């Protein structure tokens, strides 16, 4: 009897202790959430979405009422942030700018937010994300991915009699000629003055290579920009559409924000832009009184490999924390909330990085065409970050604008270079960089 009572008392004691510990843990969780407070500055690139970001602020404050969030929208986002990174004053939270800084330098500017293995359980597309992953550390929360391709105006295509998408450069030129002959729209809009818009062409490298290992192979090549190679063929299209007069007539005075309105009005047929822009163009069309479903379309790059057409889902800006932030708890809370709970990907018709999300319906045409979604393979072990090192040493800048501007300038005739002159120069720079870095 005594043994039974002792056992019962022991069980009760354990239950009480367990209840106490659980209660304390729950209180601690609530308390820790309540304790997150202070002022943070969030830098972002969405100068067109002030009202939407105000909605995000209110939603965040429903969960974290003691955090005061100040947004700073920047037009030339990457360039401005890189300049400010020479100081410690580049916000508390920001859309993570990279290349530069190169992957191995991420830790000098950003707070690590988790391990790669841990983050892969929750987010898609991190497998080959070199822009904000280095080694086993991740320096930004992924928000959404984009599929590279071409934005097109459905109504202009219908007016011009375009019934199928081109799958080669020659077919693409013919399509643009047809649009030029049968409509008053600019066949393709380059948006040259914005410059960053020219960088969007780099998003076509996997569709043009058809090889998820192409960038890994480039590391060991001296002449990866020769005729027939992916970059040559892709940027030759950029050169030719300008050279042939298939773009806007006045290349020097176009404007990014204005181009969205002109697209909705039927003055622009095609733009080379990541699928991240779809939501913006749909919203502008709606605001202008047009049905976005009848105006905004998205098509794959005009290239195929033995009949196969590829598209690469690649991560857009991730959101991270300034290493020098004086309020890292609040900064991390906002960054994670924005990635997981804001609904930003859905609001922008983008592919969500958070597992469990679905592709936006505007990309249904890719499925109808049998487009194969393929990601770049991760760097070979021991070669992490090497591609970016060579690129920076060569001063080509795959994801920077100067060399793209150079191509358009040559096509306009403002310089005496030919396209092949530029590609030969890229090869020479690349080979020299490999030699300098002792890459075999």
Image (cartoon, grey):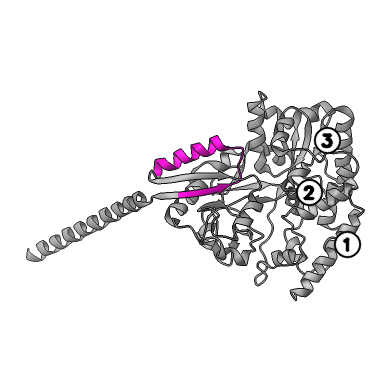
Question: Which residue occupies the extreme top position in the image?
Answer: 289
In front: label 1 or label 2: 1
Say whether residue 282 is left or right of residue 229. Answer: left
Whether 243 is drawn above or below 230: the answer is above
Which mark sits nearer the N-terminus, 1 or 3? 3
Residue to which mark 2 is pinned: 308
State the quadrant of the C terminus. Answer: bottom right
Residue to which mark 1 is pinned: 424
Query: Which element is circle 3 on?
Result: strand
Is the residue marked by circle 3 packed among few (<14), some (14-19), or many (20+) residues within 10 Å?
many
Is residue 285 magenta-colored? no
Residue in front for this viewpoint, 230 or 407: 407
Residue in front for this viewpoint, 198 or 84: 84
Residue to which mark 3 is pinned: 187
The range drawn in magenta is 40-63
| Residue under the point 49% across and 36% down | 55
Q: Would you say the residues marked 2 and 3 are in contact, meaning their CB atoms lie under 8 Å apart? A: no
Is residue 58 magenta-colored? yes
| Residue under the point 44% across and 55% down | 327
Q: CA distance from mark 1 to mark 3?
A: 29 Å
Q: Quadrant of residue 24?
A: bottom left
| Residue 17 placement (x, y as % from top left) | 21, 59
Query: Which element is circle 1 on?
Result: helix
| Residue under the point 77% across and 60% down | 396
Residue 163 visible in the displayed image:
no
Q: CA distance from mark 2 to mark 3?
A: 25 Å
| Residue 283 placement (x, y as % from top left) | 63, 32
| Residue 376 placement (x, y as % from top left) | 69, 57
């Amino acid at each position: 009897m005594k043994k039974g009572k002792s056992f019962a008392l022991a069980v009760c004691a354990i239950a009480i202790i367990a209840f106490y510990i659980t209660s304390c843990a729950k209180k601690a969780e609530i308390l820790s959430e309540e304790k997150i407070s202070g002022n943070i500055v969030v830098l972002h690139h969405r100068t067109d979405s002030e009202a939407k970001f105000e909605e995000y602020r209110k939603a965040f404050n429903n969960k974290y009422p003691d955090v005061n969030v100040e947004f700073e929208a920047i037009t030339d986002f990457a360039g401005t942030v890189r300049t400010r990174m020479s100081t410690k004053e580049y916000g508390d939270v920001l859309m993570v700018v990279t290349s530069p800084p190169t992957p191995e330098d991420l830790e000098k500017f950003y707070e690590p937010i988790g391990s790669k293995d841990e983050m892969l359980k929750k987010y898609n597309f991190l497998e080959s994300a070199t822009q904000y992953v280095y080694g086993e550390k991740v320096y930004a929360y992924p928000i959404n991915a984009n599929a590279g391709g071409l934005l097109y105006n459905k109504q202009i295509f219908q007016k011009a009699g375009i019934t199928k998408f081109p799958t080669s450069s020659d077919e693409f030129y013919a399509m643009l000629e047809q649009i030029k002959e049968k409509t008053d729209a600019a066949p393709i809009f380059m948006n040259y003055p914005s410059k960053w818009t020219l960088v969007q062409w780099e998003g076509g490298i996997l569709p043009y290579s058809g090889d998820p290992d192409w960038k890994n192979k480039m590391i060991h090549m001296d002449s990866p920009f020769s005729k027939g190679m992916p970059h040559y063929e892709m940027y030759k299209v950029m050169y030719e559409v300008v050279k042939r007069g298939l773009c806007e007539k006045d290349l020097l005075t176009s404007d990014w924000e204005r181009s969205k309105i002109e697209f909705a009005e039927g003055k622009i047929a095609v733009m080379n832009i990541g699928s991240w822009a779809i939501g913006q163009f749909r919203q502008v069309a709606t605001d202008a009184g047009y049905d976005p479903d009848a105006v905004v379309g998205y098509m794959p790059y005009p290239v195929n490999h033995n009949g196969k057409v590829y598209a690469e889902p690649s991560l857009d800006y991730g959101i991270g924390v300034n290493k020098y932030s004086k309020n890292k708890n609040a900064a991390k809370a906002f960054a994670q909330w924005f990635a997981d709970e804001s609904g930003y990907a859905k609001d922008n018709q983008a592919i969500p990085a958070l597992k469990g999300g679905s592709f936006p319906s505007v990309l249904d045409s890719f499925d109808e065409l049998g487009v194969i979604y393929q990601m770049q393979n991760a760097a070979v072990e021991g070669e992490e970050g090497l591609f970016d090192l060579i690129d920076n040493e060569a001063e080509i800048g795959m994801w920077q604008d100067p060399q793209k501007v150079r191509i358009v300038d040559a096509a306009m005739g403002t310089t005496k270079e030919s396209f092949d002159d530029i590609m030969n120069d890229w090869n020479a720079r690349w080979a020299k960089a490999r030699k300098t870095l002792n890459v075999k």
